[in-house]
Amino acid sequence: MGFGRLSAVQRVRVDEWLPGAEVVADLSWNQVETVVLRVRHAERELIVKASGDADHHMGRELDAHEGGFVSPWQHGGHAALLLHADRAARVLVLDWLPGVLAYRTPAGVDPGVHRRAGELLRRFHDQASRPSDGTDAAATRRALRWLDTSDAIAPEMQARLRHALAALPPVEDDLVPTHGDWQPRNWLVDGGVVRVIDFGRFAFRPAATDFVRLAAQEWRENPTCETAFFEGYGRDPKLGSGPSDRASGPSHWLLLRLREAIGTACWAHQVGDEAFEAQGHRMIADALAEFER
């Protein structure tokens, strides 16, 4: 096991930063171009992340770190420190964080873990806000573009989705820093501590976008996790009614879920993840059933 999955330029940069480093484990998900390696250098455990030219996640991760948005979590040991980065070469080095991924473990549906995740996310969201300026309308257009790509969504279902997207108006509410993939696959649990990884989908969005994946997965499996999460978060902005709550209420929450469902089903189909694609189709069915009720 070595650095063979990195480009020549990336290997040069890693060797400059970490001469003699040894790869301990390949932690990549192998569904996108991002490579994640756990390495040992000078008796220290580190993470090397690298991505291909078509992958936009590296830039978003660096935006989160270099913009200072990860700092509130870093100060408490809940997120890794960025040690080295080369944006042009698409490679970075982070501290390694202890803990076990909560994804598909009992911790993933543990209300106590969700309460702590809610507390962490509230701190992240509260750092800043900015006007939407068309962001929500653009998200609906992206969902429509997904429907124009290769997918396995039946034509009749596509027509119903397009009708729903047209009927649910975008809401240009204030945007906050969001993780973008807030779910147990990006939570490390270490005793009573929850730590956060992977900022590759960082962006300014409505706060409630960070709840959609949980609602489709863990909260569906164990509804008490949702209650615990919002006890930690302090409020439920997806039920809000204006900018002060950073959400527009149930109709916008339904729109967020529809867009996420479409993206999930289409993306998973294109990368060949059958289980995740099935989840996307279930999300579509659930959201449409609510819309058409």
Image: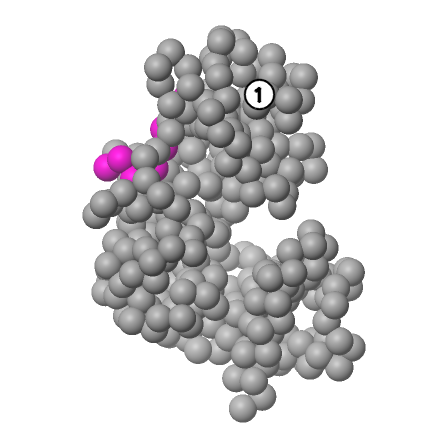
- Spot occupied by residue 7 in the image (x, y as percentages of width and height): 67, 22
Write down the residue under mark 1. 2
Inspect this view and state whether residue 259 appears.
no
Q: Residues within 10 Å of mark 1 (few under 14, many from 20)?
A: few
Report the front residue among 228 and 205: 228
Above or below, 71 relative to 84 = below
- Spot occupied by residue 21 in the image (x, y as percentages of width and height): 48, 14
For the point 37% across and 51% down, which residue is it? 102
The residue under label 1 is which amino acid type?
A: Gly
- Spot occupied by residue 235 in the image (x, y as percentages of width and height): 27, 66
Above or below, 163 relative to 59 = below
Inspect this view and state whether residue 120 appears.
yes
**For residue 246: magenta?**
no
- Name which quarter of the figure residue 50 lies in: top right
**Element marked by disc 1:** loop
For the point 38% across and 55% down, which residue is it? 105
Residue range (magenta): 76-83
For the point 49% across and 29% down, which residue is it? 25
290 to the left or right of 82: right
